[in-house]
Image (tube, rainbow, N blue to C red):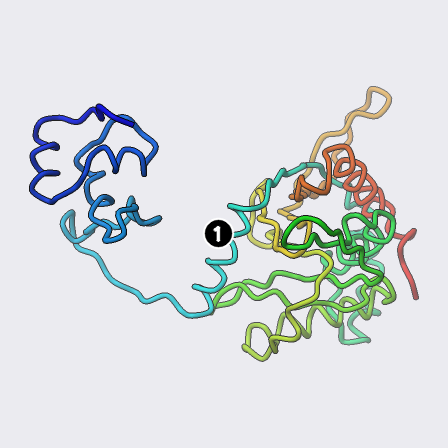
Amino acid sequence: MTDVIAPPSVRALAREKGIDLDRLGRDLGRTSIAREDLKAGQSTTGSPSASAYWDVDHVAYGPVTEEATSRFSRVAAANLAAANALIPQVTHHDRADVTAIESLRRQWKAEAAARGIKLTPLAFHVAALARCLRAYPRFNASLSADGQILFIKDYVHIAIAVDTEHGLMVPVIRDADRKGLWTIAAEISDLAGRAQARKIGPDEMVGASMTISNLGGIGGTGFTPIVNPPELAILGITRTETITVWHDGVPKPVPMVPLDLSYDHRVINGAEAARFLSHYAALIADPRRMIVS
């Protein structure tokens, strides 16, 4: 690249700093250079830093407070950034009728109290996802780092993202497809409680088939969760809302939960994702089909 376009003041500053504008233009992939680009050109290697564009002196614009990030959050941030950069992700959206689930929760309220278990909607979601992963094994797989081998798993472990004061933790429910609803509900409560207390071990947060990110208790109508490699998909859940559904010309209010399925498009195509989430929604709408005592 030659004849980079830059204002005279920028050219003068570049000369002062010893920056080769042609080389900087090649590094940035642009034909025009602005004053703020020169900071990237000062890298000792001759290549701009990946973070050069947000390496800003914020104090110059007003008062700020500095807060160091934790090691835990730095590791998580690096993993999320890598996943978002390397995986071609697509998010498919749907919703499911939760009328039957809420009815069962009311019916079983006394039994839940007697068992000392909090039966949340998340337990039904874990059970439904476990059965979907058995029905659609390509979702229960991992791609090798070089993209040459697909590892299809003969186990179903479901991870649940837990929001804690010290960052996001993602403990795993092992063999969720072989466990009944009450057992799943008890494990969710145990894992979430220990995550909040920072008593989850590293070995309890690995090996998942797929992750559920549940924002239903906070709000929102949908989002695009980032796939957590080596998993191939992640399911997002937001707050249940009442939707008007027309049946034989008669309007009926129906509680529906929004569902957001992000997936790795290298392995899963759009039609597969739509079928997967449709099957999932059917299980949520008729939970008796998936209850195991």
Left or right: 110 as drawn, with respect to 216? right
Kindly identify the residue that appears in the image at 40 percent across and 69 percent down: 70
**Observer-nearest of 240 and 261:** 261
Q: Is residue 117 above or below residue 38?
A: below
Kindly identify the residue that appears in the image at 25 percent across and 37 percent down: 23
Residue kind at label 1, given as amino acid type: Ala
**Observer-nearest of 280 and 12:** 12
Kindly identify the residue that appears in the image at 13 percent across and 50 percent down: 60
**Observer-nearest of 213 and 252:** 213
Q: Quadrant of residue 11?
A: top left
Percent across and percent down for residue 163 are 54, 62
**Quadrant in the picture for the C terminus:** bottom right
Percent across and percent down for residue 233 are 68, 49
Percent across and percent down for residue 47 are 30, 46
Q: Is residue 87 above or below residue 176?
A: above
**Quadrant in the picture for the N terminus:** top left
Percent across and percent down for residue 252 are 78, 31
The single residue placed furthest to the top in the displayed view is: 249
Q: Which residue is mark 1?
A: 81
Left or right: 18 as drawn, with respect to 288? left
